[in-house]
Image (tube, rainbow, N blue to C red):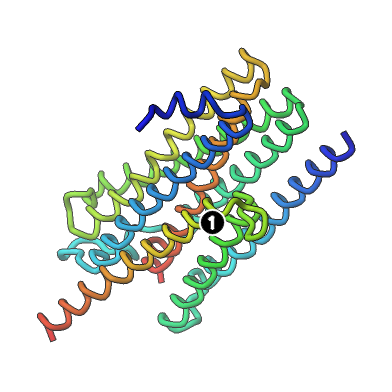
Amino acid sequence: MENAEAAAGRKLKSYLTGYGLALVLTAIPFGIAASGFLPRGTALFVIGTAALIQVLVHLRYFLQLRLRSASPERLLATAFAAVLIVIMIGGSLWIMFNLHYRMWV
Amino acid sequence: MSLAGEDTALLPEADAYEQRAFGFWLYLMSDAIIFALLFATYLVMAGNTAGGPAGSDLFSLPHTLGETLLLLTSSLTFGLASVAMDAGRRPQLLAWLAVTFVLGLGFVAMEIREFHGMIIQGAGPDRSGFLSAFFTLVGTHGLHVSAGLVFILVMITQVIAKELSQPVSSRLLRLGLFWHFLDIVWIGIFSAVYLPGIL
């Protein structure tokens, strides 16, 4: 019983920590978009970085995906999906913008 | 190849639930790949406004922030629901599920209002490549959230009718994975669609 209560406390703390971090990581990109004082390139870079960190925060604190204790199958499936996503988004953009460049410039 | 149902029936109960959670995880990863393709399509099409309105004419920062906070807070309240579930506190679990449902409903309502406003000002999905891609990506996410809302209602009914049996709590666990996953997709949407559009 003691153990179950400690586990519940840990889980509660995990959700609250995740929520706090997510709020900060949401406030930064929205603040940048609202103020507009950064040059566009830098602003996009900061927004992208904050998004990437926030995805990791959500995986760790909300989906409870931990490198040490999660099952290896689950980590492998997640890593494989991440690789596919990078190849498909990166590859599509590369091909399409390269095509655009060759056609119009 | 034997039937999956027979396979899991032979396993000890805990393993069977673990397998279902893993199967659901695989579904989420393939759903993530569908969203990735919609993101890639949107990013390629984002500049193709065909002389119509661009993101900066259509998107509102406070509206997007409101949607973001609703969905993020609903992720927290779902977390609180699952803590209540672990502790076996049924009334608390039901209350947090209900709060999550209301927050999710608020999100969908805001999205429908935004879509409606865009369509009546002539910026519907048929206006330009940019808007087709926008409605496909954001609409697919909205449909997922709506499906999640139905899923929450079903689980509220089950918790009331069936107590907190093992099958019910394993379903709640998978619903939680689904709900948190949708919040992750939303991070991508506000970072790749709304904020760059407003900048």
Q: Residue furthest right?
A: A2
Compare residues B130 and B183 and report the one nearer the observer: B183
The quadrant in which the C terminus of chain B is found is bottom left
Q: Which residue is mark 1?
A: A75
Q: Is residue B128 above or below residue A102?
A: above
Who's the residue at 63% across and 20% down the image? B159
Q: x, y (%) of residue B67?
A: 50, 49
Mark 1: few, some, or many residues within 10 Å (few <14, many ≥20)?
some
Identify whether B138 is placed above or below B52: above
Tell me how many marks there are.
1
Position of residue A59 measured from the top left corner of the image (x, y, whole percent) = 58, 55
Looking at the image, residue B62 sits to the left or right of residue B124; the answer is right
The chain letter under disc 1 is A
Residue sitting at x 50%, y 28%: B8
Image quadrant where residue B120 sits: top left
Q: Nearer the viewer, residue B75 or B35?
A: B35
Report x, y in % for residue B176. Answer: 57, 39
Q: Nearer the viewer, residue B3 or B92?
A: B3
Residue flagged by tag 1: what amino acid is it? Leu
